[in-house]
Each structure stands twice: as C-alpha cells, then as structure tokens.
Image (cartoon, rainbow, N blue to C red):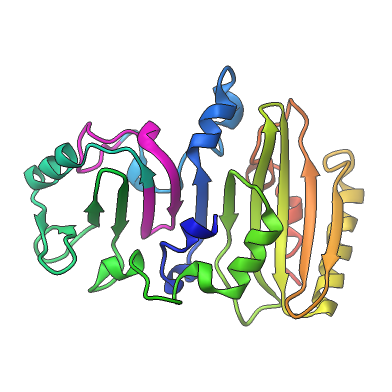
Amino acid sequence: MLQGLGSLAEDTSANQVTYLDAEKVRELSKGDEKRFASVGQPGSSLLNAYEPGPWGQHLKVTQIDTAVDTKNAGHWEGSFDAAAITTSLKSNGYKQSEDDESWTRPGRTGVSFQVSKDEISYSSQGDTPMSAVNPKDGASLADKNEYQRAAECLGDAYRADFNPLTPTRPVRLSALGQQASAAAKNTEVLCLVVKDEATANRAATELRSVITAKSPKFDGTKVTVEKGDRPLVRAVVPDTAAQRPGRLMISDVDLWMAITDL
C-alpha cells in the first residue's frame, strides 16, 4: 500500500485516494464475482465501461494488478500492450513530450499519460500535470506521517479508501480498509488519525455508541485506541458471508459518518 501511495505527490492529499490490489481481488472473486463488485474496481473514472478511454480496446481492467487513484491522477501497475496503447493515443490526437515522455493533447487539455509495458500513470492537474504522479524525493503521500500511520493501522488490506487529509481538523485522516483471508471472510477496518488523545477518546466513545445503537448491524466490532504522538482509533468490523465488502462506505455508513462532528 505504501509503495502505491509513493507514486502520488503529497499535494494530491486534498482528494480522496483509493488503493486497490486488483490481483488479490481476482483471486478472492473466483466463483463469486458479485460479492466483490463494489470494491473490486480501481477508483479511476477513466475506466468507466460506458465510455472507452483514448486507448480504445487495448487496455482492460483485468490487466491492472495494483492501482492508486484520485479524481485527477493515478498510477497503475500490471501488464500492458504499451505499443498498441500509444498507437491509439496518437490516433486520438495525443503527442509525446520531449521532457517527461508523457502523452498529451496539444494545449495540455484533458488527461496526460505516461505508458510502459508494466506501468501507466495519468494526471490532469495544473500546468505540469505529471508532477502529480512523479513526486520529488520525500514529497509523496507515502512520506506523510498521517498516511504512514493509517496504512500501518489498516494492515494487510486489499483495498483502502482514504478521505482527504485535513490537517486543521480534529480527525486528520480517516481511511477504510478491506481485508480477507478467503472470499467468505471479509473484515472492514476503519482507521482515524487524530490530533490528540482527547479526540481519540471522544471518537472511540462515539463509535462504540453507534455500534450499540445500531445493533445487530455492527455486532462483533472491536474499537481500540493507540495513544502517542499521533493517536489512532481503530474499529475492526467483521462481515458475514451474506454481507458484501464495502458496506461501511456504501450502505452501512453510520460508523464513518459518526466522526464528521468531532
């Protein structure tokens, strides 16, 4: 996860960020694709099945092994037909720049791309869009303490959704991760990186209150507080085989919403 976050510049922290181990999801989905339908796709709108990208038919979601995306930029790793993709970009009016080898339409309108056989980066941010996916040393999301803490808290998650970083708020960063040892055994982990221990205790109390009030929706959930320089609140929510992964951000949003007024 941190390796994926290392491909995005720190100024992308103003956006929601989604990390996905798509290869892991494909393994889990064998025989039950519907169960992981909500969490099994990268977060990029460029992969909208109803509107093919400028690569035509030469890029498929199944070719992506890991992805990290915001609404404006992202980085995918996998196995790609770079020659076919760049040929399609050319046919759609893209030209390759000499400085960063990115593919951009004249006037730098729309999305810019960098393409190789095992990596694709894209961005539509500002006058130098590829800077969003080519961070300087020490200036990536993975270098920010809040993301390091959240990633450690989420553990071995095949998917993680990070809300925008808010350094001036009591809850600095919140993230929801999905873990699964098998297709029928999914666990959702909600992590909050907060400003101080008082906020951590208040958040934990609020989460426990929601768990009790909404029973049996979140039965079995364990809330813990990790104190220190950057306190953490962690809620581990077990899913049953009948509950689709991702419910905490799609349908059962009470826990995540509980922190908005802290």
Q: Position of residue 110 (x, y in %)?
A: 22, 58
| Relative horizontal placement of residue 115, taking residue 213 as reference (left or right) | left
Q: Is residue 210 above or below residue 91?
A: below
Q: Position of residue 87 (x, y in %)?
A: 10, 41
| Relative horizontal placement of residue 237, taking residue 44 as reference (left or right) | right
Front residue (pair 142, 252): 142
Q: Is residue 38 above or below residue 206?
A: above
Q: Is residue 4 above or below residue 91?
A: below
Give me the residue at 36% from left, 34% from top: 63
Q: Position of residue 213 (x, y in %)?
A: 90, 50
Residue at far top of view: 31
Q: Is residue 55 magenta?
A: yes
Q: Is residue 8 above or below residue 33?
A: below
Magenta segment boundaries in residue numbering: 51-76
Rendered-image quadrant of the C terminus? bottom right
Quadrant in the picture for residue 183: top right
Q: Is residue 235 magenta?
A: no
Q: Position of residue 68 (x, y in %)?
A: 45, 53
Q: Is residue 50 visible?
A: yes
Give me the residue at 52% from left, 67% from top: 142
Front residue (pair 39, 147): 147
